[in-house]
Amino acid sequence: MSYKNIDADQRITHDVEKLTTDLSGLLTGMVKPSVDILWFTWRMKLLTGKRGVAILYAYMLLGLGFLRIVSPDFGDLASKEQQLEGTFRFMHSRLRTHAESIAFFGGGSREKAMVDSKFKELLDHSMKLLRKKWLYVILDDFVTKQLPHNVTWGLSLLYALEHKGDRALISTQETSPPTASKSSELDGIPIEDVISFIDVDIITPGQKLLAAKLTCDVVQGESLLLTGPNGSGKSSIFRILRGLWPIVSGRLLKPSQNLNKRLQSECGLFCVPQRPYTCLGTLKDQIIYPLSHEDVEEWMRRTGEKSDASRLVEAHLKSILENVRLVYLLEREGWDSTPNWEDILSLGEQQRLGMARLFFHHPKFGILDECTNATSVDIEEHLYKLAKEMGITFITSSQRPALIPFHSKELRLIDGEGSWELYSITSEYAS
């Protein structure tokens, strides 16, 4: 079963219901018309004889043949509409499931554009189907009702003229069936070279205090390691950094993210969440997310590479895949295939793909929320070494001692009740 062609949720929740409904009406839908045909044939023969019945059936066959020729393939159109509805519903389901990961990546605009494009496809197809149905109903009404009625009416006039001679009957009838159509809109202060918490209370939406009066500076080149027991508030600090939670008290200075402005300025802050997220699209889409192909190629042209922007982008992305040791995905899937990445990639591969996004956007600061805990220690050290060589300063949440050498400070959340401690990682300990 190919996931590209079949949406299991759509089949189970909608298509099966429609099939059973249609099957339940099949018997009555066949018996009544059959009885009607036999009854009216018998009555017609009594009134007009065999010739009248022959004319009736000849007209019926011609009319059905004409309607069959001009009739669109409503089966395929309806099937495509159900497929588009299923895709649209599936994308909303993915958004609910991965809402926090998308928010960490700043992918709201990209996801909205993708959902809007699918909605536009569904709307355009639905309008196309309605127009075809409307035209078909007009033709069907004309062939089965208006034309026989008008012909019968005309013959009746001729018959009356023949038998009454000098009596003139002038009758006009104008029919204009009415038609109607209904057409179904206190944050962190931006600063470029430092992340600074100044007396910030880390408070959950449920009003639980996790860290009181947090004061900490992260300057470029001095990465911060965030440690503490589960539930102590490590991810909560990242949510406040990303703007998902409000700052109740204190001040937060941080760089701007600048991802949805067509790369007009350098990316200052990029978040890689603990929970991996793979968007709908190609391998190239996974790396450049939340940007689009047009954004990236426009940036390449703006920087002076106007000859073959697409080729240069692909070469750059391939080097990133080599760095995160995922180049075999390119060899296996290519740039243009769109599988369900969440199904075919392991958790470790998805996390490495998240790091590939970090390397592509090349921010000044990287917010890494246990985003490599499913990879092996050697791969993890390799990724952090690359990030450090690229000049990326990171704030990392991790329990692995192997990452200590890549950081200059350690912020330890003690108990999740407001206590915290800030340490300087000495060069002797780090080595």
Image: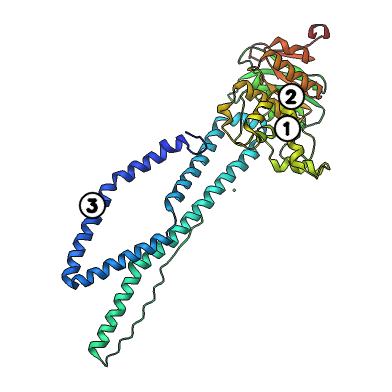
Q: Left of 133 or right of it: where is 103? A: right
* Residue type, numbered disc 3: Val
Residue 11 placement: quadrant: top left
Residue 299 placement: quadrant: top right
Q: Answer yes or no: is residue 422 visible.
A: no
What secondary structure is marked by label 3? Answer: helix
* Residue at mark 3: 31
| Mark 1 or mark 2: whose residue is earlier in sequence | 1
| Mark 3 or mark 2: whose residue is earlier in sequence | 3
Q: Left of 72 or right of it: where is 247? A: right
* Residue type, numbered disc 1: Leu
| Mark 1 or mark 3: whose residue is earlier in sequence | 3
* Residue type, numbered disc 2: Asn
Image x and y of residue 98, in percent? 58, 30
Q: Residue at x 66, y 30 (%)?
A: 331
Q: Which mark is residue 220?
A: none
Marks 1 and 2, Cα distance to the nearest angstrom?
10 Å
Image x and y of residue 20, in percent? 33, 41
What secondary structure is marked by label 2? Answer: helix
Marks 3 and 2, Cα distance to the nearest angstrom?
69 Å
* Residue at mark 1: 317
